[in-house]
Image: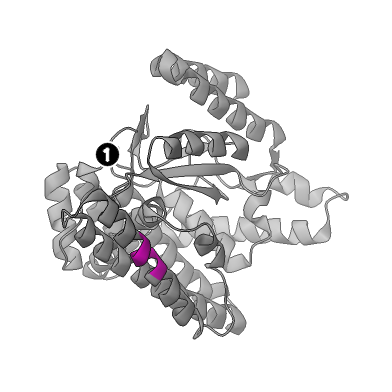
Amino acid sequence: MSCGLRIVVIAMLLVLTGCANLGYYLQSVRGQLDIWRRERPIGEIIADPATPPALGEKLAAVLRMREFASRELGLPDNASYRRYADLGRPFVVWNVFAAPEFSTLPVQWCFPFAGCVGYRGYFAKDEADRFAAELAARGYDVFVGGVPAYSTLGWFADPVLNTFIRNPDPGIARLIFHELAHQVVYVRDDSVFNESFAVAVEQEGLRRWLERHGSAQDKLTHEHRQRQREDFMRLIQAYRERLDAFYGSGVAPEAMRAGKQQIFEAMARDYEQLKAGWGGFTGYDQWFAHKPGNAHIASVAIYTRMVPAFQALLREQGGDLAAFYRAVRELAALPREERDAKLAALAGTLPATAASADRRP
């Protein structure tokens, strides 16, 4: 898409949003335009003698991952992840998550095209922090998390960014597979469905990529990290269930606050015990350093709640990704309650649906 046409599309977006959100959308437009201004074709950067060799090697590896994604995983073969931009900052956006004081259900914000999602993204951290402070002053639990990449859902070509190019190769592959999955299936107003599907695709894609291209050390490191990730997710899920039960107990607000604090303190202690068996891995320390609250719990649940259901669906299709994508599209076309019921049956659990989430702060 030409720059002129992209600007026209963004102008239409602004007209559709109305004045109430104009400031927020203007920062979004500025951020997206800045990315486009910095982009260069990867092939051109690799061929440039001024490109540091380490960056050139990483970008060449990205192109191989990109080809693998389309050829072996059936992910879209388009212009995404064929250009590179250095943003000069550690994250592309900072997402603000919020939840009520006594609930782990996320606040949702609604946008044109993307629908309602359980976070609000900012291209500048100070703006994200300012919005989070406004929500906190109104009694919400808040969490601001940096994001290395995001998907424009196929509306534009998403670039490779400096925010993740220095990751180990398996981490880069995982991210690219995840973001391209959003271009395969995306359901308005259902963040849990969208993110859980993309996580299932990234995990299966990475497994296949490692079989073909990973070194023995890559595979061993992946096995360790996957176990650690699963340990962390189980810990958060267990405490989410514990919090939900406590919040539904009907005790007085002061007792609720005291009990909430005790539960989060117990979660932190359990994390330290869990980490002791990880051989020195401290990858989740930063998450706990932010003094977790309901918004932290909500931010994890968005990405993981229905992953087992999608993994079960992939097994039902015999590992055939094309058939899996067709089955997921069929699920996506169903009414929300029917879709949730089918996912619950696949996972063998009853979902804590986000349909009742607080829609607006």
Residue bearing mark 1 = 358
Q: Is residue 335 above or below residue 7?
A: below
The front one of 36 and 224 is 224
Q: Residue 307 in the image: x percent, y percent?
A: 31, 62
What predominant SS class does the magenta segment belong to? helix
Q: Is residue 280 above or below residue 330?
A: below
The front one of 184 and 107 is 107
Q: Is residue 142 visible?
A: yes
Disc 1 element: loop
The front one of 185 and 244 is 244
- Its colouring scheme is one colour
Magenta-tinted stretch: 261-265
Query: Are there few (<14), some (14-19), or many (20+) residues within 10 Å of tag 1?
Result: some
Residue found at x 43% / y 53%: 75
Q: Quadrant of residue 227?
A: bottom left
Q: Is residue 257 above or below residue 23?
A: below
Q: Is residue 183 magenta?
A: no
Residue found at x 54% / y 37%: 128
